[in-house]
Image (cartoon, helix red, strand yellow):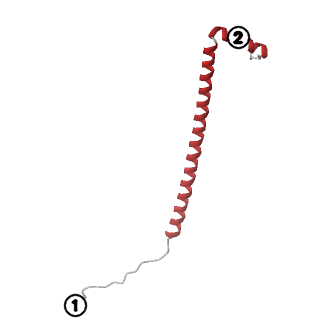
């Protein structure tokens, strides 16, 4: 059964709460609820900011890794070649 409370029902509920708990307790409860909501919002903003910062760092890291990879690709080309060193014999064979 959903709560379809209209204006008078809310007024009656507030009056009953005031009679049971008193005005100072309800005011303190309202302040505490307000603080809790404010802290919750601040933490939510903090988490979102941390996620955005981490996302930006990952993107910057990926860009740097891409640049490093591009630099390596430019310098580490494989060329089809053979290194040939001339053969020099320090002591010629004279035993013939």
Above or below for 83 versus 68: below
Q: Quadrant of the C terminus?
A: bottom left
**Which residue position holds label 1?**
94
Above or below for 62 versus 13: below
Q: Mark 1 or 2, which is nearer the eye?
A: 2
Quick one: which residue is furthest to the front in this view?
24
Q: Image quarter for residue 95? A: bottom left
Mark 2 element type: helix
Viewer-proximal residue among 54 and 41: 41
Graded by Cα atoms within 10 Å as few (under 14), some (14 to 19) or many (20 or more), the crowding at tag 2 reads few
Viewer-proximal residue among 58 and 16: 16
Quick one: which residue is furthest to the left in this view?
95
Q: How far across and how far down the image is residue 68, in percent? A: 51, 62
Above or below for 9 versus 92: above
**Which residue position holds label 2?**
15
Going from the N terminus, do you reach mark 1 or mark 2 first? 2
Q: How far across and how far down the image is residue 44, in percent? A: 60, 35
Measure the C-alpha gap from mark 1 to mark 2.
Answer: 123 Å
Mark 1 element type: loop
Q: Image quarter for residue 9? A: top right
**Residue 60 circle label:** none
What residue is rendered at 50% in x and 70% in y? 75
Total of numbered circles in the picture? 2
Graded by Cα atoms within 10 Å as few (under 14), some (14 to 19) or many (20 or more), the crowding at tag 1 reads few
Q: Quadrant of the N terminus?
A: top right
Q: How far across and how far down the image is residue 21, in percent? A: 62, 11
Viewer-proximal residue among 23 and 8: 23
Q: How far across and how far down the image is residue 38, in percent? A: 61, 30
Above or below for 39 versus 10: below
């Amino acid at each position: 059964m959903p709560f379809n409370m209209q204006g008078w029902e809310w007024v009656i509920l507030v009056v009953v709460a005031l009679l049971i708990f008193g005005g100072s307790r309800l005011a303190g409860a309202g302040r505490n609820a307000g603080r809790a909501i404010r802290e919750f919002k601040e933490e939510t903003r903090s988490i979102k900011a941390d996620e955005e910062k981490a996302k930006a760092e990952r993107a910057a890291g990926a860009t740097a890794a891409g640049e490093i990879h591009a630099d390596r690709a430019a310098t580490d080309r494989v060329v089809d070649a053979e290194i040939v060193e001339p053969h020099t014999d320090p002591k010629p064979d004279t035993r013939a």
